[in-house]
Amino acid sequence: MGSNPIMSIMLDSYFNPQLSLYLNLKTIKGISSSKARHICSSLGLSTSFLLKNLSSRQLSLLSSILSDLERDPTIYRNLQLNIKERIDTLIKINTHRGRRIRYGYPARGQRTSSNAKNSKYTRSLFHI
């Protein structure tokens, strides 16, 4: 690994120094390609700029941008919590979809006569 602190784990994603900054940013769950492009442009870099070529000033700017993004509700951990809360709400208010999720059936209109067995099997494996 390198001596750059940014190449370690940030926002539960490992940054590969051999890839461009743009591609590394896209590996973070919740950062779209447009948001990654915006971050690159705010640093004054092209999307093909390699992560290992970042200066210390650019590294500090990037880490401050990523720490600000960590508070965004659409980024990784917050996104996971948000999805789980919405599913729990569906189950709690006893909607049709919530009941289907609780019993382990397909909830989005899929067939149940032939492929629901697969849905039940994967559900039992992961204890959702």
Image (tube, rainbow, N blue to C red):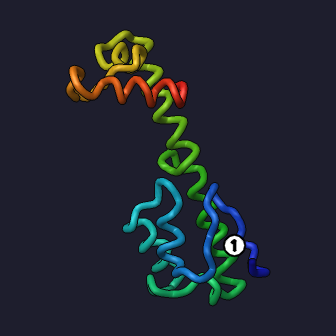
Residue drawn at point x = 40 percent, y = 23 percent: 120
Q: Measured along the vertical axis of the image, is residue 124 above or below residue 51? A: above
Residue 23 appears left or right of 9: left
Q: Name the residue at the top extreme.
A: 94
Give the crowd class for mark 1: few <14, some 14-19, many >=20 residues within 10 Å: many
Residue under label 1: 6
Disc 1 on helix, strand or loop?
Answer: helix
Locate residue 66, reporting x and y percent: 60, 63
Q: Which residue is rendered at x = 42% and y = 74% of the image?
A: 37
- Give the image location of residue 63, x and y in percent: 66, 69
Q: Residue at x 36, y 29 (%)?
A: 118
Q: Is residue 102 left or right of residue 116?
A: right
> What is the three-letter code of the residue carrying label 1?
Ile
Q: Is residue 106 left or right of residue 24?
A: left
In front of the other: 16 or 123: 123
Of 85 and 108, which appears nearest the observer? 108
Q: Position of residue 113 (x, y in %)?
A: 21, 20
Seen from the viewer's position, the closer of residues 45 and 124 is: 124
Question: What residue sits 53% from the left and 78% below the top?
Answer: 21
